[in-house]
């Protein structure tokens, strides 16, 4: 993928949130996206046509993260009210609320089968919740972190968490094994490469670090952006050729995965870029910001 193919042209601005947008995520086929923010709402959009479709309101505090199932029928969300909400997308109804975290919820993810939600909390724990059971108790609690857990990734057999304690920890659910990689700097976001071989970790020393999942080797570091006090998402393009990250000055950076050179950077928002999400198939990206907008970028 050449640099000219990178999505740097603004194609739509999605407006509607009142205050900072804390996350924006494509759904699994990339036709829709979800956003959430300080105004306690979750919003569903068609980013390609610039259309707002639905608003989901029930959280009592800011909503920090949202994830939708692969069949687009359910979504989960978490935030400052310490609860994980499990929603029906079509009706906008809350099917279930999971309570158990002793602090705000920083991140939520469905597993591959959409039967389990895993949440990452300020209370230094990861918790897994069964969406199909009537029980409100978590089916698993992982509390070996020593500071706030900011981000979570899932594979078929593993839960991976990134924490302010400077670690990325991988838990193999089948055999109950834990592996810990200490990056020595607070981790505020982790993202998996599309081939599943690497973890990209955004750290609060304005550096992103690429870890080999099998050897735990530090493969590369990416710098140039500012990330010191906000939770900023990071991701890879759908070909894994480039690393993408937002910056506290409103810029978005693209780095070459292999040699870590900045191949492009541009001013995308008037304030902190809180998240970036890349389209699963096309050269298209969405970004969200404290400036209350979600922007859609194409080539």
Image (cartoon, rainbow, N blue to C red):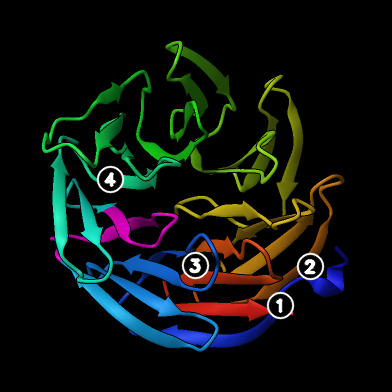
Q: How far across and down, in percent of the image, does residue 66 sit?
A: 35, 57
Q: Is residue 31 above or below residue 216?
A: below
Q: What's the mark number on residue 169?
A: none
Q: Is residue 18 left or right of residue 242?
A: left
Estimate the x, y position of residue 236 in percent, counting from the top left.
67, 53
In magenta segment, residue 70: yes
Decide: is 232 above or below 109: below
Rendering coords of residue 166 (x, y %):
50, 29
Q: CA distance from mark 1 to mark 3?
A: 17 Å
Q: Quadrant of the N terminus?
A: bottom right
Task: For the residues labelled 2 and 4, say whether their Cβ atoms are less than 8 Å apart.
Answer: no
Disc number at residue 105? 4
Which span of residues is magenta-colored?
Answer: 58-77
Towards the viewer: 63 or 206: 63
The residue under label 1 is: 8
Neighbor class of circle 2 (other Cα within 10 Å; few <14, some 14-19, many 20+) is: some
Q: Which residue is mark 2?
A: 264
Query: Would you call the spot at circle 3 few (<14 residues within 10 Å), some (14-19), or many (20 or more)?
Result: many
Determine the secondary structure under disc 2. strand
Q: Earlier in the sequence, mark 1 or mark 3?
A: 1
Viewer-nearest residue: 85 or 181? 85
| Of pointers 2 and 3, the one earlier in the residue sequence | 2
Label 4 to label 3: alpha-carbon separation: 21 Å
Q: Which residue is mark 3?
A: 272
For image coordinates 46% across by 10% down, the residue present is 175
């Amino acid at each position: 993928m050449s640099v000219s193919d990178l999505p740097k042209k603004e194609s739509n601005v999605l407006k509607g949130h009142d205050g900072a947008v804390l996350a924006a995520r494509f759904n699994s086929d990339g036709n829709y996206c979800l956003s959430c923010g300080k105004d306690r709402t979750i919003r569903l959009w068609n980013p390609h046509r610039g259309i707002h479709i639905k608003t989901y309101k029930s959280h009592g505090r800011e909503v920090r993260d949202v994830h939708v199932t692969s069949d687009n029928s359910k979504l989960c969300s978490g935030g400052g009210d310490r609860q994980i909400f499990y929603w029906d997308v079509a009706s906008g109804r809350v099917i279930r609320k999971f309570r158990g975290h002793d602090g705000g919820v920083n991140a939520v993810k469905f597993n591959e089968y959409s039967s389990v939600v895993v949440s990452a909390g300020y209370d230094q724990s990861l918790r897994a919740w069964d969406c199909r059971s009537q029980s409100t108790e978590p089916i698993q609690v992982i509390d070996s972190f020593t500071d706030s857990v900011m981000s979570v990734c899932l594979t078929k057999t593993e839960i991976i968490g990134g924490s302010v304690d400077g670690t990325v920890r991988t838990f193999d659910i089948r055999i109950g094994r834990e592996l810990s990689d200490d990056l020595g700097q607070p981790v505020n976001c982790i993202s998996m490469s599309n081939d599943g071989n690497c973890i990209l970790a955004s750290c609060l020393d304005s550096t992103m670090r690429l870890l080999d999942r099998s050897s735990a080797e530090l493969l590369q570091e990416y710098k140039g952006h500012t990330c010191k006090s906000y939770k900023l998402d990071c991701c890879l393009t759908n070909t894994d050729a480039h690393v993408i990250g937002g910056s506290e000055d409103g810029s978005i950076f693209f780095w070459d995965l292999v040699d870590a050179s900045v191949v492009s950077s541009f001013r995308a928002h008037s304030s902190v870029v809180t998240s970036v999400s890349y389209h699963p198939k096309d050269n298209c990206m969405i970004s969200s910001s404290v400036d209350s907008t979600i922007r859609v970028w194409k080539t």
